Image: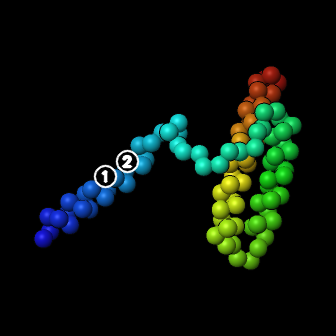
Amino acid sequence: MQTPIRLFAGALIVSLSTISWADESSRIDHYKPKASETLEQAVENLSEYNSKLADILAKDELSADDMHNVHELSYTLEEALKKIHTDLAEVADVLE
């Protein structure tokens, strides 16, 4: 009886550990972020979507819909932050 349990536990561990093998390029994106092609767009998106996020988080309790909306907002916030980070790194290089 121990063998089936051990086999199941081993299979579960192996299957869960394969999740960590996935690299960033194979990640599935669920939502299309709002474009942040310029620094100005990125700052606008960061401000707008951060405000939306703050409104959701100001609630006493978060519903499943709220969590879904936070997840969706995070894609645009991530893109905006990437663009800002990249552009500021370039500015830092120029200044040095």
Question: What's the mark number on residue 14?
Answer: 1
Label 2: few (<14), some (14–19) or many (≥20) C-alpha neighbours in 10 Å: few
Element marked by disc 1: helix
**Which residue is label 2 attached to?**
18
* Relative to 5, 23 lies left or right: right
Give the residue furthest to the bottom: 60
Image location of residue 8, percent across then percent down: 24, 62
Q: Residue at x 76, y 66 (%)?
A: 56
Image location of residue 11, percent across then percent down: 27, 56
Quadrant of the image for the C terminus?
top right
Image location of residue 38, percent across then percent down: 82, 33
* Relative to 18, 27 lies left or right: right
Residue 94 at least partly seen: yes
Q: Residue at x 20, y 60 (%)?
A: 7
Question: What's the mark number on residue 26?
Answer: none
Quadrant of the image for the N terminus?
bottom left
Residue 84 at least partly seen: no
Which color mode does the image show? rainbow
* Relative to 56, 19 lies left or right: left
Q: Are marks 2 and 1 in contact (CB under 8 Å)?
A: yes
- For the residue marked with disc 2, what is the amino acid? Thr
